[in-house]
Image: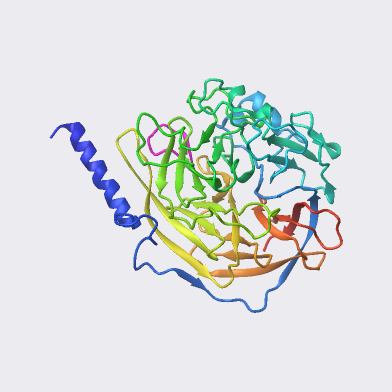
Amino acid sequence: MSATDSTKTKFELSRRQALVAFGLAGAAGVEAVRGTPSAFATDHIDVPSISGRVVAIGIPGASALAPVGTFLPGGPIHDKPELAAFTQPGRVCDPTRILVGSTSNFGAPKANADQAAGSFLSIDPSGADLAVPGRFADSGGQASALGGAVQLYSAQSPNWRNGVYTPGAVTADQTAVANPLGMSINNAFGRFWPANAPYGLNGPGSSSIADPDGRPLNNALNPSTGGVYYDGVTGRTPTQVIAGAIAKAAVGTALIGRSPDGSGRAVFAVVVADGSVVQEHTVKALDGIAPPGTVQPLVHRSWGRSRVPLPRLGVVLNYAPELILYVSQPFDDSIKVIRLTTGGPPGSEVFMPAGTRTIRSSSLDQPLDLAPVRIETAHPDRASNTTLQPNTDFYACNRGNDTIVRMRQDGTVVAVRRVLLRHRSLGSARLNGIATSTDGSRIWVTFVGSLPGGHDQHGGVLELPAF
């Protein structure tokens, strides 16, 4: 047997072993690791409350949100003066600000008429009762309003096409953001990574690498992909190590870390609305991780009202002592736990599934988003709003009853809090996203709908104390 054949055989065996461990050898989408018990947590009959304050209103479809955070030395946003300028106090990527997803372009013209609008706002969370003007960004750039307290980071508008910096990319016409449903920020050694549903849950999705100016990656090392991964056209060439595509909406994302292939490049996990999970390599483009049905699919799902934003889910990563993805499953009132390992041909190693389990709890009621209780802010390979500090808990944001659950990684419920506004219920408004401040002292949640006593019908952001 040749050395090449031997390597290929070893890889096929390791991949088959991983698939068997993952429960995929016979039937894709079957609950993995047969015989592995799900984690059940105790019910909480009396639920204490936490009362928040309004940061901003007037944000249609307010969804994913993330603290910008500090970018570490050694990464491009810290080290390159032209990028670091965007992180100065009051600028769009000031570390103290938060990014908030919306279904609106806030007046900016669409780049692609057949796709949904959408944007990320950069908001100063120290503000209160900020009423975001509906068309403040009609200039089509990184416009600002309310004395700079609200700024447009990126939108589904021509200024943010992939082709601005990479005109030869197969996704040159795609934008960094289009109906965004997720955001993971590589504060360790990279950039901003939105996840998008430009054609709704059932159409092809996209995920991007965005610079501080909100545009897809400048000076991309992969001229075919540039800074946007889309549908099935940006897979690894000439052959994927594991088959996969963003064939449906990208509904959640999290930084995994540096690639296991030794290149040092960033790899992100993206959960697709068909229940598959893919991995995106900054240089080598897209491979799969797990097939459709691994996570409960969101295709053909809705909250039951036509103007309510699309369902989405949360993704967070634990990196020590092993790599584990936690993914919320809002229509199953559960959290999918996916263990990761590595494998593949030398020089082309990828992340692979090593098994799953499911966390179930009567405290979970349509958990649509997750956030670390303590964000990893210091690790040079892992720092991200979607990365858990080792041994920390995570928060699950429940849309069904407007509660937040603090949960250990084994599924044990630590505490549950019902979200109130000035000690009153949220009325018809519903929670739609969660993020934690980098110092762990505050929680931000997005909501959609009208708050009691308010006239805004869109949505916005509340700030709450951590617990």
Nearer to the camera, 371 or 295: 295
Rendering colour mode:
rainbow
Type of secondary structure dominating the magenta stretch? loop
Residue 184 visible here: no
Foreground residue, 149 or 234?
A: 234
**Viewport quadrant of the C terminus:** bottom right
Res 422 quadrant in image = bottom right
For the view shown, which residue lies furthest in the bottom direction? Answer: 45
* Farthest left residue in view: 1
Quadrant in which residue 378 is drawn: top right
Image point (53%, 29%), residue name: 171
Q: Is residue 41 visible?
A: yes
Residue 68, relative to residue 285: is it above or below? below
Q: Which residue sits at x=33%, y=32%?
A: 347
**Residue 62 drawn at (x, y percent):** 71, 50
Viewer-closest of 335 and 250:
250
Start-end of magenta stretch: 258-268
Pinpoint residue 226: horizontal percent, then vertical percent: 53, 27
**Quadrant of image for the N terminus:** top left
In this image, 171 relative to 35: left or right?
right
